Amino acid sequence: MKKNEEFIVDIIDNGFQGEGIAKIDGMTIFIPNVIKDEKVKIKILKVTASHAFGKVLEIIKKSESRVEQDCETYEKCGGCNMRHINYQKTIEIKKNSVKSTLRKALGKEIEIQEVLSMDNPYNYRNKLQYPIGIGVDGKSVMGVFAERTHRIIPTQNCKIQDKLSQKIANHIFEFVLNNDISVYNEQNLSGALRHIIIRIGKKTNEVMIVLVTNKRKIEKEQELISYIVSNFPEVKTIVKNINNKNTNVILGNENEILFGNGYIYDFLGDFKFKISPMSFYQVNPVQTEKLYSKAIEYAEITGKETIFDLYCGIGTIGIFASKNVKKLYGIETIPEAIIDAKENAKINNVKNAEFFTGDVEKILPEFISKNNIKPDVVFIDPPRKGCDKKALDTLLQIESSKIIYVSCNPATLGRDLKILEERYELKKIAICDMFPYTSHIEVISALQLNK
């Protein structure tokens, strides 16, 4: 098999990122934008010793699950890599992917009790991040990065972004063009405006705008602020974030409030949360409520428990559970997040919570040893890399009755569950489709201590 060769193949399965899988003489071929049971003509793009990558040239036999494209950029940006598939079929693919991943990690078949899908899987994101730069034609452009590149694809109507956020972004960019405001040039590190970030409270309709700049001053800065505020009364605050480093990281460390008080509010269930420019806040609050409610249901708390919320962020899961527990302790690495968590507890009159800053693997054993506290339930919601081995070892030692593990990465979840199985039994698993039409999925696992 060689690069640029063409073949007609049958798609025998879909992988964990939604890609189609075919076989040619025993070699596995990965092909995006195709569905199991389709017959397609492909072109080979890359060949390795064990597998190859191809692209579809022609669909000879279509799957019944294929839907017509409703977005002109999705194949280029790579964000919604399942947009060509019927929504219910995407849920089936994700469910099978989670089962397959956990089967390989744990060496046994895993039953998924529930699937929390989304009733309306459109315009669900509450956070828009559009880079602004110089296009291939030398003109200013705003949109999304093409997959695995820094080439910006012009974007005005993304199907998963909030409609108001997109409208505001489009107006800001129009003002930038009409007023010759300089945009970031990645080649020579010049220009002012790098990113437009818009966050919206889905229940409050409050809007925050963050203008990420390469310079301390944007041309016609006050005129831009006046234009935004006069056209969009929903905008409660505008913040300038200064990032003049040659980096892929979007936000710099310095914020300057240009309008308002620097934050907005939103609700999850009955709880009110303060969102600042640096805050982590789930991008799909509709599904977040389902996720947290299921996690708390699996914990079977009665009001007498002491709970730990590890990797707690701004305290959302713990605060969500706080009215049903005796005491809540939260631990998070990022200091700014803990400041927000304490503020959110205060806003919601949660008096049974304490939050601590530090690496979970360091703080957890020290805290337990010093205070002689044994949690009844531990909630874990780690980043994609999963839990640190030392943190898992500590959990095995303290022997809380239940562990509720919320994961955004089934591979690291499987690895960590394998370790926890030394003392815990996996009782229930549910999946929550937090990011419809993408390959990402959230998994809720309930573990019970072996007596």
Image: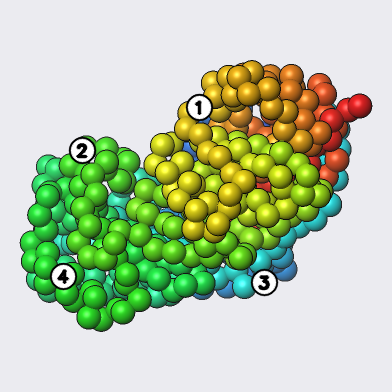
Mark in front: 4 vs 3: 4
Q: Is residue 51 left or right of residue 101?
A: left
The numbered mark at residue 224 is: 4
The mark that comes first in sequence, 4 or 3, is 3
Q: Which residue is mark 1?
A: 359
Quadrant of the image for the N terminus?
top right
Circle 4 residues within 10 Å: few <14, some 14–19, many ≥20? some
> Residue at coordinates 37% horizontally, 68% vertically from top-left?
207
Which three-letter amino acid code belongs to the residue tagged 4?
A: Leu
- Give the Cα distance between marks 4 and 3: 37 Å
Q: Is residue 55 above or below residue 59?
A: above
Residue tagged 3: 119
- Tell me which corner region of the image, top left, top right, bottom left or bottom right, holds residue 415: top right
Image quadrant occupied by the C terminus: top right
Disc with the residue nearer the chain's start (1 vs 2)? 2
Q: Which residue is mark 2?
A: 245
Q: Position of residue 71 (x, y in %)?
A: 47, 70
